Amino acid sequence: MSSFRTMEWVDGNLHLLDQTKLPGSEEIVVCKTMDDVCESIRNMVVRGAPAIGCAAAFGYVLGVRSLVKDLNVENISPNSCSSLVTEGREKIYYSLLKTRPTAVNLEWALKRMQSIDYKKYKSMQSYVNAIELKAICLLKEDINTNLKIGEIGADLLGRCRSFLTHCNAGGLATGGYGTALGVIRSIKSRLGDINVFATETRPLLQGARLTAWELTKDGIQVTLITDSMCGALMQTREIDAVIVGADRITANGDVVNKIGTYTVSVLAKENNIPFYVAAPWSTIDLSTRSGGDVEIEQRNVNEVRGFGDSVWVQENLDIFNPAFDVTPVEYVSAIITEKGVIRGSVGLQEMRQS
Ligand code: MRU
């Protein structure tokens, strides 16, 4: 397992390791309300596709808990208050859903929460208890899924010793253990010494701040490069494989992931280095045809103007800041999921049916 907790449900509140403060300090943000969770997802206190899905599930619990309290219907049978509860649940669902648009895990987790039929319960309080349990299960399920992805990935890439990864697809981006970094953790535990090159990942530096922090913490050798060094690294050093995570994988096998992933995939193809994507099945969106149909989150231009309090560009400069890009299916050697290794859109369709 990873040696830190990305999130924890403590006495009915959601505790998040504040990823905006890493690696400088390890601080916890306590979310007591759904709005606290929405803000933490928007501000990237918690980030990474599976992690925001898990956090949103707890946000849903906090939202429903206060709805039931505000309506004063804890001990009432759900059938006597159904229209108010239905309306309130919809609002909670959409408030959480709209926090970040690209990662499909958010919608996946919220749909799982929303699918619990409150009318089946004797009282609204017993329904709240049931959804609390469900969110706890989703978090555990995510960690177990990642452990499985790690083992499947290690079976596939067991002979690789030198990796390049982009952004942070680690324990911090999930309930724990990680997807791409989960595979790296599993290979490390089988092989011993391995090397990981982490891209800085402009503009929010998830690679420099988060991947470097979590790999160092877990005793995995990591070397940091700036994003523009990828090509030179692939030309001059032995890289056995690139491995990244994903925010959404569409029906044709396109991979939507952190901005810069596409560039890395093109360089990998040019240099004959296999490019792997590790992701849970909850990241696969078979209802969307291709990457071009996915809404790409556009973030605040201040993220590009500087970092923290430092601003290094002139005022009023035009800035483009998409948070994600699309890696076309032909650049992806394989997708490693908890159900197995998938190659291309045919592989996705076959795996869906199995
Ligand atoms: O903007 P972020 O930091 O939420 O983006 C995260 C990524 O792009 C990750 O690579 C992706 O979510 C996979 S996490 C297992």
Image (cartoon, grey):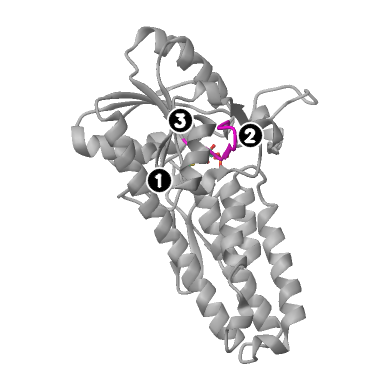
Horizontal side, residue 11 vs residue 3: left or right:
right
Quarter of the view holding residue 58: bottom right
For label 3, the residue is 343
How many numbered marks are there? 3
For label 1, the residue is 339
The x, y position of residue 106, in whole percent, is 59, 52
Name, please, the residue furthest toward the top: 236
**Residue at 70 percent of width and 39 percent of height:** 295
Quick one: 71 or 287, which is closer to the camera?
A: 287
Name, please, the residue furthest toward the right: 316
The CA distance from mark 1 to mark 3 is 12 Å
The answer to whether residue 306 is above or below residue 124 is above
Q: Is residue 219 visible?
A: no
For label 2, the residue is 323
The CA distance from mark 1 to mark 2 is 28 Å
- Disc 1: CA contacts within 10 A as few (<14), some (14-19) or many (>=20): some
| Residue 250 is inside the magenta segment | yes
Ligand 1 under 8 Å from disc 2 Cβ: yes
Give the residues drawn in magenta, as a range: 245-254
The answer to whether residue 325 is above or below residue 27 is above
Horizontal side, residue 20 vs residue 140: left or right:
right
